[in-house]
Image (cartoon, rainbow, N blue to C red):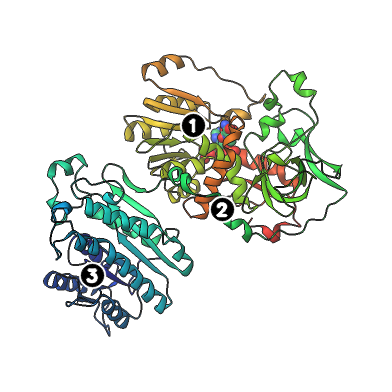
């Protein structure tokens, strides 16, 4: 939702503190506002201020641009006002409700175990204002938004103490914890166009914040500035993918979504992850007598010269423990050229040559077209992903245990296979990534780089990314990268030295050659550099030439650093778990998957696609649509 003049917002607790800050920030965009508060004098003052700011946007209006409604939010039929009436008045005045900010909140004045009152100083009253009223206001906001038949954004003010305990005020902490879980549980209202999110700042310099022990504030890195709270709230309003999200704002770590994806993966059930599978309607597949596939005929890193398309008979019936998959999309990888040169098989040249001809392609998604007699858990028509050799083909027969069930056979899912899994598993296992670190990703706008930057950001890190070209730099900014270094216009070494003088904690390095050396020199004390690949070395005159790294041991020793290799094939036991995680993040809108816009359709276009990836011009994941006859039914290409 774009925050613009003419929208309307209702802000509870709008007379002071965060509510006031957000009301004034919305007014700066020309938004009409209803201030709901118990404090009449201050509430009216804020409404007057909003009107004054709003006059820059609106000249002749038939209604005021701000109104004040006196109301105790804890009591829907209070003597001082009626909460439902406040929403009704808003609807009558502005004809709709676009944004609702539930900010009214109080600290608990008397320790609950000593509390013998039942008035406004009791712990029950604190719970009523902080939690019960938020439920009530959310209910009324949803009702009002539905009545106006317009999309809406609701932001509930939680608190960092709703995420972790606040020993000085357990009632406050508990009530805010309730707000967090209540708001997160409302994610599905997004289907009706109503997005409920929760904002959890640490201490802000408001009346409430100023009551907190200054030593504690000092330990937290000072007060969180109001501008940061406004930035967070505006992100939750404007970003349409945010629903049921909880944004934690601290001075120490910046803005961070909680829980992190790996925390979330611990409690999500398999059925929740795969509910969307049923949405896919499989096209029927006729089994032909023969099919085409790409075969490596000669060992060379020049993929085009190495391979040819061959027609081969489809041997039926399918073996007992096997499935036959109709391939829809195949993923293109930097290492296709290493595979065609025989590098994947190790051994010497004559050993590898004795394997010729062999099938090319590492990964694909498709539909199960036939199953062997002993296969019970997979059915014809189910979408699945494969990560085995021979994916540049119209059909492939594989042991059923190799099938990775996926909700849909889309290009985005192909991107999540080799590229997504490499980023997801390597950052966790080889990079031991946590939060609050500086993470550098090279070739960041490529197939795997795009996942690495987003996962590092989602985990709460500062992310630096290198790429070649302005279009890629723009994309990386959109993916949330904090500092993009376009090496066409800036020197990577100079930027890192100047802006990250303490070094980089984790490096996801896939370029090799000079870039590897540069990265190694930029690594911080205790830093970890993950060797993902060395794309710059794959296409040398005589293929891949290994390099020498003099002084490597001395460098690592001097700074207690780690250089960790990572090869995805050795982590097969984690593929399904991480694929589920990636798909879940993607379907919740937390992860974007960029597929290169250039269309490659049919097996004859695979060599072009491989060359496109190595041209340095590709953006995101390069994907080939294998059978043109099937693409319109399922394609997004
Ligand atoms: P990719 O990143 O999509 O590759 C394209 C990008 O790489 C280009 O946009 C370009 O980015 C950069 N590039 C291409 N040719 C280059 C050259 N000659 N010199 C320098 N940069 C060049 O490809 P990918 O398939 O995702 O693979 C990326 C890397 O990850 C490769 O090294 C690959 O081997 C590795 N990988 C490893 C594993 C594993 O298990 N270890 C798994 C998957 C991939 P910029 O110019 O914008 O930097």
Is residue 388 found left or right of 370 in the rendered image?
left
Residue at which label 1 appears: 429
Counting from the top left corner in percent of width and height, residue 164 is at: 29, 46
Which element is circle 3 on?
A: loop
Quote the CA–CA distance across marks 3 and 2. 39 Å
Residue in the picture at 41% in, 14% down: 554
Q: Is mark 2 within 8 Å of ligand 1?
A: no
Residue in the picture at 74% in, 55% down: 628
**Which of the marked residues, 3 or 2, is nearer the chain's N terminus?**
3
Quote the CA–CA distance across marks 1 and 3. 48 Å
Residue 390 seen by the camera: yes
Which element is circle 2 on?
A: helix
Counting from the top left corner in percent of width and height, residue 320 is at: 80, 41
Of marks 1 and 2, the one in the foreground? 2
Question: Which mark, residue 63?
Answer: none
605 is higher (above) or lower (below) than 499 = below
Q: Is mark 1 within 8 Å of ligand 1?
A: no
Image quadrant containing the C terminus? bottom right
120 is higher (above) or lower (below) than 618 = below
Which element is circle 1 on?
A: helix
Q: Quadrant for residue 498, please give it.
A: top left
**Which of the marked residues, 1 or 2, is nearer the chain's N terminus?**
2
Is residue 413 found left or right of 463 in the rendered image?
right
Counting from the top left corner in percent of width and height, residue 76 is at: 25, 74
Characterize the local packing of mark 2: few (<14), some (14-19) or many (20 or more) Cα atoms within 10 angstroms: few
Counting from the top left corner in percent of width and height, residue 430 is at: 48, 29
Residue at which label 2 appears: 271
Q: Quadrant for residue 364, please give it.
A: top right
Q: Quadrant of ligand 1?
A: top right
Characterize the local packing of mark 1: few (<14), some (14-19) or many (20 or more) Cα atoms within 10 angstroms: few
Residue 515 seen by the camera: no
């Amino acid at each position: 939702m774009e925050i613009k003049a003419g929208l309307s917002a209702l802000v509870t607790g709008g007379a002071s503190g965060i509510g006031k800050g957000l009301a004034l920030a919305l007014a700066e965009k020309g938004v009409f506002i209803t201030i709901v508060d118990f404090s009449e004098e201050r509430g009216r003052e804020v409404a007057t201020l909003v009107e004054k700011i709003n006059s820059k946007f609106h000249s002749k209006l038939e209604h005021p641009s701000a109104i004040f409604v006196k109301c105790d939010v804890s009591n829907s039929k209070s003597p001082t006002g009626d909460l439902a009436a406040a929403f009704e008045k808003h609807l009558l005045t502005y004809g709709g409700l676009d944004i609702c900010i539930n900010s009214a909140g109080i600290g608990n004045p008397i320790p609950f175990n000593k509390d013998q009152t039942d008035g406004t100083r009791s712990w029950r009253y604190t719970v009523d204002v902080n939690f019960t009223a938020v439920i009530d206001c959310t209910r009324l906001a949803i009702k009002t938004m539905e009545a106006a038949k317009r999309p809406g954004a609701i932001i509930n003010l939680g608190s960092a103490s709703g995420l972790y305990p606040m020993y000085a005020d357990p009632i406050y902490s508990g009530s805010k914890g309730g707000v967090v879980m209540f708001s997160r549980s409302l994610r599905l209202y997004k289907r009706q166009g109503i997005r409920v999110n929760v904002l959890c700042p640490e201490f802000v310099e408001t009346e409430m914040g100023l009551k907190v022990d200054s030593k504690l504030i000092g330990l937290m890195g000072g007060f969180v500035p109001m501008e940061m709270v406004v930035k967070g709230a505006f992100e939750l309003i404007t970003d349409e993918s945010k629903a049921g999200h909880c944004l934690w704002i601290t001075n120490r770590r910046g803005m961070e979504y909680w829980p992190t994806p790996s925390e979330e993966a611990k409690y999500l059930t398999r059925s929740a992850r795969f509910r969307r599978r049923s949405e896919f309607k499989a096209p029927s597949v006729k089994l032909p007598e023969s099919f085409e596939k790409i075969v490596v005929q000669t060992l060379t890193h020049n993929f085009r010269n190495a391979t040819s398309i061959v027609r081969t008979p489809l041997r039926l019936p399918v073996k007992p423990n096997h499935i036959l998959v109709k391939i829809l999309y195949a993923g293109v990888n930097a290492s296709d050229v290493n595979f065609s040169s025989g590098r994947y098989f190790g051994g010497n040249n004559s050993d590898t040559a004795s394997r010729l001809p062999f099938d090319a392609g590492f990964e694909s998604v498709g539909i199960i077209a036939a199953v062997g007699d002993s296969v019970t858990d997979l059915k014809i028509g189910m979408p699945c992903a494969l990560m085995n050799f021979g994916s540049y083909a119209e059909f492939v027969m594989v042991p059923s245990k190799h099938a990775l069930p996926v909700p849909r056979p889309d290009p985005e899912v192909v991107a999540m296979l080799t590229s997504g899994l490499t980023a997801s598993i390597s950052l966790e296992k080889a990079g031991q990534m946590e939060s609050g670190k500086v993470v550098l990703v090279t070739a960041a706008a490529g197939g795997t780089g795009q996942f690495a930057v987003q996962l590092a950001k989602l985990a709460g890190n500062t992310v630096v990314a290198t790429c070649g070209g302005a279009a890629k730099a723009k994309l990386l900014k959109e993916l949330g990268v904090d500092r993009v270094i376009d090496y066409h216009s800036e020197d990577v070494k100079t930027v890192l030295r100047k802006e990250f003088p303490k070094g980089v904690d984790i490096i996801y390095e896939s370029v090799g050659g000079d870039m590897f050396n540069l990265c190694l020199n930029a690594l911080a004390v205790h830093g970890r550099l993950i060797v993902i690949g060395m794309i710059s070395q794959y296409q040398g005159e005589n293929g891949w030439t290994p390099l020498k790294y003099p002084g490597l041991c001395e460098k690592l020793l001097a700074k207690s650093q780690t250089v960790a290799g990572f090869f995805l094939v050795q982590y097969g036991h984690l593929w399904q778990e991480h694929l589920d995680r990636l798909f879940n993040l993607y379907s919740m809108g937390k992860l974007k998957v960029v597929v290169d816009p250039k269309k490659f359709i049919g097996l004859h276009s695979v060599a072009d696609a491989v060359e496109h990836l190595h041209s340095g011009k590709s953006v995101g994941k390069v994907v080939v649509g294998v059978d043109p006859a099937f693409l319109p039914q399922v394609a997004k290409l």
